[in-house]
Image (spheres, rainbow, N blue to C red):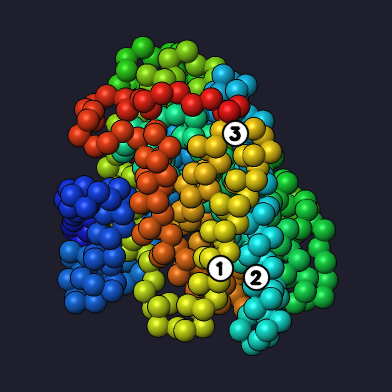
Amino acid sequence: MQILLQLSFSLVGGLLMSRLAKRLNLPAVTAYLVTGLLLGPYCLGALGFSHLGFATTAAVDELNIISQVALGFIAFTIGNEFRLDQLRSMGRQAITVGILQAVVTTALVDAALVALHLINPELISVSSAITLGAIAAATAPAATLMVVRQYKADGPLTRLLLLVVAIDDAVGLVLFSASFGVAHALESGAVSIITVLVEPVVEIVLSLLLGAAAGWVLYWVEKFFHSRSKRLSISIGFVLLTVGLSMVEFDVGAIHCSFSLLLVCMMTGTLFCNICDFSEELMARVDGWTTPLFVLFFVLSGAELDLDVLANPLVLLIGAVYILFRSLGKYAGSYASCALTGCSDNIKKHLGITLLPQAGVALGMALTAQQLSGGAVVRNVVLFSVLVYELVGPALTKRSLVAAGEIREEGKTSARKKNEAPAPIRLDK
C-alpha cells in the first residue's frame, strides 16, 4: 500500500506542479524535480508523512528499478536519432564535438582542482581531483530529452545535441575509467593497465554488441505481429530485457566484464530504427507510453537529492569550483569543436549550455569513486553539483533552444503537433 501511495503522489504531484512551472515559464522537468524534493526525506519525509512521501533515502532506493527502466527507454529513444541520413549529414560533427567537449571539460576541471590542491593540500587530494575531472565530462541525457520532447524542439542544434549527448556517455566512460585507474594507482602505488585501458574498452564493445543483437532480434520478432498494440508491447518487453541484461557482470580471467545500460539500449534503438521500415510510427507510440514513467523518474531523482551537502562549507567551496570550470569546459569545448567542424554560429553559441545537465551517470561514477580515500568528498561534490545542475539545467537548455529558434513560443502551436523550427539553419554557415 505504501509503495502504491508513494507512486501515485509522485505521479499526480509532479503533473500538478508542472502546471505551476508553466506559469513561471519553466520546463516540466524542473517541476518534477522540485516535487521530488518536497516528497523526499527533507520535507514531507522529515515531517513523518511516510505514506505521502519518502521518509528516508533507502525508501527512494527501493524504487530504483523504475529509474533504471526509465533510463533504458530514454537511451532507446536517443538511439532512434542515429539514423543513417542523420549520421551522413552530422555524424562527423557529432563525433568530433562529443569527444572534444568532454576532453576539454575534463582537462579544465582537472587543472582547477589540482591547483586547489596545490594551494591547500588538505582541501582535496590529487586522486580525488582527477576523478572529479573525469566525472565532469558526463552529461545527463534524460533532462535534455525531456525538454526537447515537451517543447517539440527541432532543428540542427537539437539534432546535433541528441547525437552528442549519446556519444558523451561512451566518451565519459573511457575518461572516467582511465582517470579512476590513475587515481587508484596514485594511492596504491601500482598501475593496472587492465583497469585503465582494457576494461573500459571491453565494456563499450560488449555493450554495443549486446545492443546490436537485441535490436536485430527485436526487428525479427516484430515481423510476426501486425497489430500496433502488440508491436508496442514487444518493443516495451525488449527494452526491459536489455535493461535486465545490462546489469549482468562476470569475470574473464583478470578482466572484469560489465555493460553500460545507456550504451546497450542506445545501440538497440539505433540498429532497430535503421533496419525497420515502421520504426518511426512505433517509436511515436513508445514515446506516448513512457510519459508517466519519465515523470516518476524525475520525481524520484528529486527525492534522491541530498540537501545535507549544503551544510558543509568544504563541499560548497570545491563544488563551486567544479561547477564553474565544468560549465566553462562544456561551453568552451563545444564552441571550439563546433568551430573546428564548421557548425553555424547559432550552434556554436548555444550547444555548450544545453550540455550542462548532470545526474544519474555522474552519480554512478561517484559511487565507484568511493573506493578512493577521498571518495566521500567526490560523492558529496557530485551530489551538490547534481542538485544545482538538475534544478537550473533544464531551464537553461530551454532558453538556449528558444534563442536558437528551435522552440516556438508557447501557445502558438498545438501540443499535438510537431513544433517545427521557423526556418532551417544550415550547419556549414
According to the picture, the residue beneath numbered tag 3 turns out to be 343
Mark 3, residues whose alpha carbon is within 10 Å: few (<14), some, or many (≥20)?
A: many
According to the picture, the residue beneath numbered tag 2 turns out to be 112
SS label for mark 2: helix
Rendered residue at 72%/45% (across/down): 202
Q: Do we see residue 216 in this rendering?
A: no
Quadrant position of the N terminus in the picture: bottom left
Seen from the viewer's position, the closer of residues 160 and 215 is 160
Q: Mark 3 to mark 2: distance in Å?
A: 29 Å
SS label for mark 3: loop
**Looking at the image, is mark 1 or mark 2 earlier in the sequence?**
2
Is residue 226 toward the left or the right of residue 175 in the image?
left
Amino acid type of the residue that numbered disc 3 sits on in the rendered structure:
Cys
Q: Evaluate if marks 1 and 3 touch, with contact meaning CB atoms under 8 Å apart.
A: no
Quadrant position of the C terminus in the picture: top right
Is 277 placed above or below 92 here?
A: above
**Looking at the image, is mark 1 or mark 3 earlier in the sequence?**
1
Rendered residue at 77%/51% (across/down): 198
Q: Mark 1 to mark 2: distance in Å?
A: 8 Å
Q: Position of residue 134 (x, y in %)?
A: 64, 60
Q: Evaluate if marks 3 and 2 touch, with contact meaning CB atoms under 8 Å apart.
A: no
**Looking at the image, is mark 3 or mark 2 earlier in the sequence?**
2
Q: Evaluate if marks 1 and 2 touch, with contact meaning CB atoms under 8 Å apart.
A: yes
Amino acid type of the residue that numbered disc 2 sits on in the rendered structure:
Ala
Is residue 92 toward the left or the right of residue 185 in the image?
left
According to the picture, the residue beneath numbered tag 1 turns out to be 322
